[in-house]
Amino acid sequence: MLTRSPRPQNNLPSAASLHALDWLNAFLAALLMGFGPFLSGCLADRGWMPANIGLILTASALTGLLLQAPAGDLIDMAKSKRALVAMGAAALMFAALIFGMRSDFPSVFAAAVVQGMAGTVLGPGIAAISLGLVGHNALAERLGRNQRFSSIGGLVAAGLMGVIGYLFSTRDIFFVTAALGLPVLLALTKIRAADVHFGRSCGASNHDSPQPQRASRAILFKDRRLLTFAVCLFLFQLANASMLPLIGEALVQAQGRRSSLVISALVVVPQLLVAVLAPWVGRTAKSWGRRPLLLIGLGVVPIRSVLLAFTADPALLVLIQVLDGLTGAVLGVLTALVIADITQGTGRFNLAQGLIGTLSGVGASLSTSVWGLVAERLGQMVGFLGVTAVALTAVAVVSVFMPETNPSAPQRRPAVVGRSA
């Protein structure tokens, strides 16, 4: 019988390692900002057909989905999480250089696959390093700080890349993106290896053992809380991921060229709010618990979708998007935190992140196609009302089935049975 027995965390990380983690989050978010919409815009400028652009984006996303869970298992087993994150960052730098220098389909396709592979270790790897540095008791506040620096880094990079694309060319954006990998690698070297506790970083109970015991992988599929949380995030992504694309389609029809400015504001405003609110979410998750914040973060999603269904006014749309910032701050902190709560003592923290990340990714992928088709056939208002129904279902799932996971409540910690090396 392997039970959860958290130990006092006496080996505190150095201030230098914690500050380096701040910079790591900021520069990594800046590095990741170079992909996504900038990639599709660059390929379109080179004369690529929309179908081929879609195939490239799908290749990257599908690679990430297929490798999320195996990557999580690898992160749990890896002695050096920093090395994995460094390899992921280096792979992104390589992919960015290929995107910048080559235009032929095989090269761009291969770079997209590399990008998808790299993404599977970066976010979970940062969460693992954070847990290994500060331990479970301080994880909530640390995740809030991570989210703040990520938002700041992403916002600064988005502005910088927009200016570079305007003054020079979209191709140059990828050379800047590749260069941003250098401060990521530098920040990783500033995190002391001795400060990242191996046992803590995978959520193991026997922290001090050089080979911490792990619960059986199958135990994750038997934990009702983890399954409920996975369903909740799947429903959230199924509802949320399509909203900005639906808004964008309506804006292009109503605003023409001005729509790009409005869409930029719709992206930037929530991120500003995330940067402001994320540390508060981390602190409040310790005092209020996880469940009330989760209900708040998910509860504003159906409100937002209903409001979006009844307006196309740019000023109102930007105002409504403030709600997305609240949701982003809550989910950005609570996703890894709730998983850490549930898997504490199992040694399977990162595998659980990968499994939930896979299900969330499937929800996001289905969202844009399902609600895009509904909006095309039945109208945009029906599409938003369908999104509202799914978002309300996610709230109901949390309200009825999801218990509080804060480890300060002993009754929420069922024992873990079965173990494997």
Image: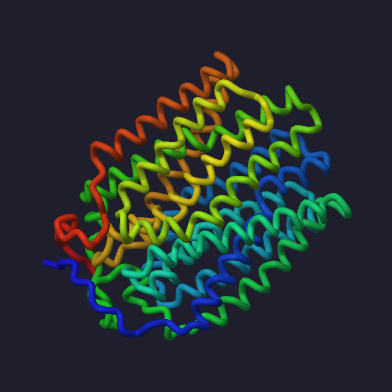
Residue 282 % position (x, y) = 41, 60
Residue 316 % position (x, y) = 63, 31
Which of the colour schemes (rainbow, by chain, secondary structure, one colour) is used?
A: rainbow
Quadrant showing the N terminus = bottom left
Quadrant assignment, res 110: bottom right
Q: Is residue 242 above or below residue 309?
A: below
Rendered residue at 71%/48% (across/down): 39
Residue 86 % position (x, y) = 56, 72
Count of all numbered marks drawn on residues in the image: 0
Q: Nearer the viewer, residue 262 or 28?
A: 262
Rendered residue at 65%/61% (across/down): 30
Instruction: Locate residue 23 relative to residue 301 in the image: left or right.
Output: right
Residue 421 % position (x, y) = 25, 70
Rendered residue at 38%/83% (across/down): 12
Rendered residue at 72%/34% (across/down): 50
Instruction: Locate residue 372 relative to residue 393 in the image: left or right.
Output: right
Q: Is residue 22 above or below residue 230?
A: below
Q: Is residue 143 above or below residue 308?
A: below
Name of the residue lying farthest toward the right? 167
Quadrant assignment, res 267: top right
Name of the residue lying farthest toward the top? 378
Instruction: Locate residue 360 relative to residue 100 in the image: left or right.
Output: left
Name of the residue lying farthest toward the left? 1
